Image (cartoon, rainbow, N blue to C red):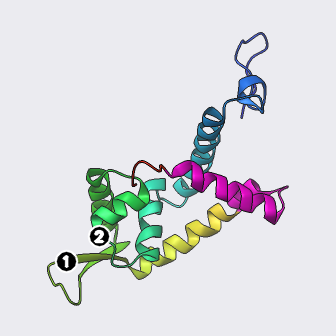
Amino acid sequence: MRKPPSGSAIPAVGEGKRGEAGYLGYLLRQAANAHRLRMDRALGEAGLTLPQFLVLTMVRAYPGASDADLARLTQLTPQTLSVIVGNLLKAGWVARQAHAAHGRIQMIRPTPAGETLLDACRRRIAPLEAALAEGFSEAELALVRRWLVAAAQDPHMET
């Protein structure tokens, strides 16, 4: 991150309300945006967008998931998911295949080219994940993971 010009009223990341004195929600958003930018850059060098990477990852992790399930898993709208899947199909990174028991249901799976690309992207983002964990013990990371999961859960609404 660049430091703001001297004399600027906007504090640098890590200072004032953009630092440890900040509101949790703001700091969470600040961190998520910074991480997304780093991910976009790393994946862009491989020719993939972050939403495409998310779809490929979830298609591999949850074979047989419906389009609606994939939209929820990737936190994308069904319309956006449809466009992304269409682009992944055109690129040859995923394929649709009829469900074995329910022929009308079309399952999406990564192609061998999609698997290769996904593995290459995972290698690109591994240093980003390591940097996030740097300086924290396993117990601290477990606490952070537990907090993030709790923050994402809404007891009044199913996501």
- Residue farthest to the bottom? 100
In reply to whether residue 53 is colored magenta, the answer given is no
In reply to whether residue 141 is colored magenta, the answer given is yes
Q: CA distance from mark 1 to mark 2?
A: 8 Å
Depth check, front residue: 97 or 135: 135
Residue at image mark 2: 66
- Answer above or below: position of 26 versus 154: above
Q: Where residue 88 appears, x then y in whole percent? A: 34, 65
Q: Where residue 67 appears, x then y in whole percent? A: 28, 65
Depth check, front residue: 98 or 144: 144
Q: Main secondary structure of the magenta part?
A: helix
Q: Which residues are magenta?
A: 127-153
Q: Which mark is residue 117?
A: none
Looking at the rendering, in which quadrant would you find the N terminus?
top right
Q: Where residue 119 appears, x then y in whole percent? A: 56, 74
Quadrant of the image occupied by residue 63: bottom left
Residue shown at 47% from the left, 75% from the top = 61
Q: Is residue 104 left or right of residue 71?
A: left
- Residue farthest to the front? 156
Residue at image mark 1: 105
How many marks on residues?
2
Q: Amino acid at mark 1?
A: Ile
Disc 1 to disc 2: CB gap under 8 Å: yes
Residue shown at 72% from the left, 12% from the top = 9
